[in-house]
Amino acid sequence: MQPQLPIDVDADTGVWTTDALPMLYVPRHFFTNNHTAVEEALGRDVYAEILYKAGYKSAYHWCDKEAKQHGISGMAVFEHYLKRLSQRGWGLFTIVQADPASARARIELRHSSFVLAQPGKEGKLCYMFAGWFAGAMDWVNDTSESGKHAPRSQSKEVQCAAEGHAHCVFEVSPLAQ
């Protein structure tokens, strides 16, 4: 994969944009140090819940903006989302299986930025991504005729490379009623 992104810098404001969305560009260690400091202050469970909701909302918004920007729809938007996440250094994301009508998907993540930035740390380190996949799946279903009756989705990290696995895995499934 060639990580070529269209990055535009406004000469007057210094704002960076990619695909017409304002972006921030920070070193991985800076982001990870802030992430782990907040996790330590709030506790992992509380922080994970906050990140899930914020990530869900952000992914849904991103999918909506990108669909309009590029004239794409359905799972093509979800696939584009993972491509852009991969190009931005979060890791390499792949949809292994997906069935939007049943709100199900399996996503693999190789070379997670969280695992790479915390060598020797064990456990599920990549939970921040979980809400992103549920938000993207619900956007797909909310905007396609075939998905109008699909259940809402939820997502969770079911395996992490920091647990000794070759890669991380996330599962999207129907939200429990």
Image (cartoon, rainbow, N blue to C red):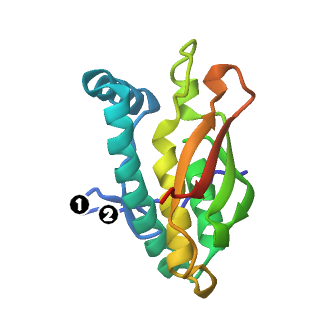
Could you give the CA–CA distance between mark 2 and mark 1, rounded to whole angstroms?
Answer: 6 Å
Quarter of the rendering containing residue 112: top right
- Foreground pick, 136 / 43: 43
Amino acid type shown at disc 2: Asp
Task: Single out the residue that lies furthest toward the front.
Answer: 177
Circle 1: is it few (<14), some (14-19), or many (20+) Cα within 10 Å? few
Q: Tag 1's secondary structure?
A: loop
Q: Going 56% across and 80% down the picture, which residue do you hit? A: 149
- Mark 1, residue position: 13
Callouts 2 and 1 close, C-beta under 8 Å: yes
Circle 2: is it few (<14), some (14-19), or many (20+) Cα within 10 Å? few
- Mark 2, residue position: 10
Q: Going 66% across and 27% down the picture, which residue do you hit? A: 161
Q: Is residue 68 visible?
A: yes
- Foreground pick, 85 / 43: 43
Task: Single out the residue that lies furthest toward the bottom.
Answer: 145
Q: Residue 121 location in percent, x, y?
A: 53, 15
Image vertical order of residue 135 relative to residue 117, above or below: below
- Foreground pick, 103 / 2: 103
Number of numbered discs present? 2
Q: Going 51% across and 58% down the picture, which residue do you hit? A: 175
Amino acid type shown at disc 1: Thr
Q: Tag 2's secondary structure?
A: loop
101 to the left or right of 41: right
Image vertical order of residue 168 relative to residue 136, above or below: above
